[in-house]
Amino acid sequence: MTREEIVENVNSLLAEEFEVDPAGFTPDANVRDTLQLDSLSLVDLVALIQQTYKIKIPVSELRTIRTFENLYDYIQSHLSQA
């Protein structure tokens, strides 16, 4: 899966799940702020990404995912390991 496909798929998935306009999904935008995530919604986000891409996101690594760019990078790097 290419970087472009990851970005497109993630943006579409998150826009639908969290009912947010994907126009705000810029690489440097804060994921939690943009999606208006509380702690429960954050769990939903992690579960959605893990289920969709068949990757694990440990809590320790979740803390490093602040922006959409971080999220795309994480998914891309872990997909290549699968």
Image: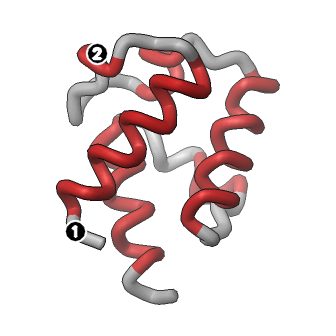
Q: Look at 46% across and 75% down and name the residue there.
A: 78
Q: Position of residue 59 (x, y in %)?
A: 71, 54
Q: Where is residue 73 in the image (x, y as percent from the top left)?
A: 32, 59
Q: Is the residue 26 above or below the residue 5 in the image? A: above
Label 1 and label 2: CA atoms lie apart by: 22 Å
- The mark found on residue 77 in the picture is none
CB within 8 Å, label 1 to label 2 = no
As drawn, the residue found furthest toward the right would be 40
Q: Which of marks 1 and 2 is in front?
A: 1
Local crowd size for mark 2, using a 10 Å CA cut-off: few (<14), some (14–19), many (≥20)? some
Depth order, front residue of 82/17: 17
Q: Look at 66% across and 68% down and name the residue there.
A: 56
Q: Look at 47% across and 45% down and name the residue there.
A: 65
- The mark found on residue 2 in the picture is 1
Q: Classify the position of the N terminus by image quarter.
A: bottom left
Q: Is the residue 82 above or below the residue 66 in the image? A: below
Amino acid beneath label 2:
Gly
Q: How many marks?
A: 2
Q: Quadrant of residue 24?
A: top left
Amino acid beneath label 1:
Thr
Depth order, front residue of 50/13: 13
Q: Is the residue 56 above or below the residue 17 in the image? A: below
Question: Which residue bears the numbered disc 2?
Answer: 24
User: In the figure, is residue 5 to the left or right of 65?
Assistant: left
Q: In which quarter of the image is residue 75?
A: bottom left
- State the SS at label 1: loop
User: In the figure, is residue 66 to the left or right of 28?
Assistant: right
Local crowd size for mark 1, using a 10 Å CA cut-off: few (<14), some (14–19), many (≥20)? few
As drawn, the residue found furthest toward the bottom would be 81
Which comes sooner in the sequence, label 1 or label 2? 1
Depth order, front residue of 18/42: 18
- State the SS at label 2: helix
